[in-house]
Image (tube, rainbow, N blue to C red):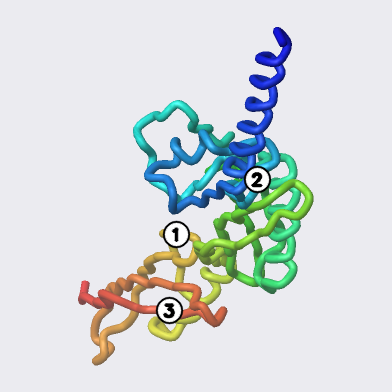
Amino acid sequence: MRLARPIIVSALATIAVFAIAPAIASADYDCADFATQEEAQEYLLPGDPYGLDADNDGVACEDLPSGGGGGGSVEKTPPPPPPKLDKSVARDAATRVARNVVRESGRLDNVAFKGCRRKSRQHVNCRFLARGTGGDRRVTCRFKVAVEGTNENPATDIGARRCRTEVTARLQYGRAKAAMQRVAADLAGKQVPLDISRLNRLTFWGWSEWKQPTPDATATEACYVELTVELQPSGSLRVRAENLACLAE
């Protein structure tokens, strides 16, 4: 009879376990049962039997407010930064675009690379200077090409072009002198000496002196005239006679 008491106690313990187990197994929770994310985290068991981690990232009930650092919270690992766009890749992509600008322009002949500047990990701006010469005009354009994206497939965008046109024509000395001599000869009625000098690449100034009879042919007068000749955009010459004066001697 001494063994009867241990056997009875063991049997009662077994009955108690089976009585409690169904209660634990039948317990169920969802995020609405918790006030904070930290509380829900404590019930995130292996295998997630309560379905508290829908995206399976190790954080239970992410939409719940934080309880200010509860014991079970798990912080998400921040995503890695995006890959860095190499400047050499950006330069090559931008240069191809810049060359297309020259080919499609009709006014530009060549383009020069002027450097790249990084704006962010995946954004680089590259600058270019393009030039063209045609007829009596020289065109200079400055622009930039923005390159953005990854090294495998960057996107490009052309910025505004700032262009300047300069006149490159130059009036030659011989042509200017010949035009001024014709006008002076018409005024004097004969070929007269002429002294000229250049004012700029398009303009000459000169003067001439001669003697001629007075209108009544009773005396002689000395005449003086100033002449200006200018090359026009059309390529023709404009000659002006100014300060013509004749004084009897």
Q: Nearer the viewer, mark 1 or mark 3?
A: 1
Name the residue that disc number 3 marks. Answer: 239
* For residue 231, above or below residue 132: below
Residue 249: percent from left, percent from top: 21, 72
Mark positioned earlier in the residue sequence (3 or 2): 2
Quadrant position of residue 44 = top right
Residue 6: percent from left, percent from top: 68, 14
Name the amino acid, label 3: Val
Of 53 and 140, which appears nearest the observer?
Answer: 53
Disc 1, disc 3: CB below 8 Å?
no
Left or right of 95? Residue 117 is left
Name the residue that disc number 1 marks. Answer: 200
Q: Which structural element holds mark 1?
A: strand
Regarding residue 166, the answer to whether it shows in the image is no
Residue sitting at x 44%, y 73%: 229
Left or right of 7? Residue 42 is left
Regarding residue 68, the answer to whether it shows in the image is yes
Label 3: how many Cα within 10 Å (few below 14, some 14–19, many 20+): some
Q: Which structural element holds mark 3?
A: strand
Q: How far apart are marks 1 and 2 (CA)?
A: 92 Å
Mark positioned earlier in the residue sequence (1 or 3): 1
Name the residue that disc number 2 marks. Answer: 49
Q: Distance between the residues labelled 1 and 3?
A: 15 Å
Residue sitting at x 70%, y 7%: 2
Of 240 and 137, which appears nearest the observer?
Answer: 137
* For residue 232, above or below residue 108: below
Left or right of 56? Residue 227 is left
| Quadrant housing the N terminus | top right
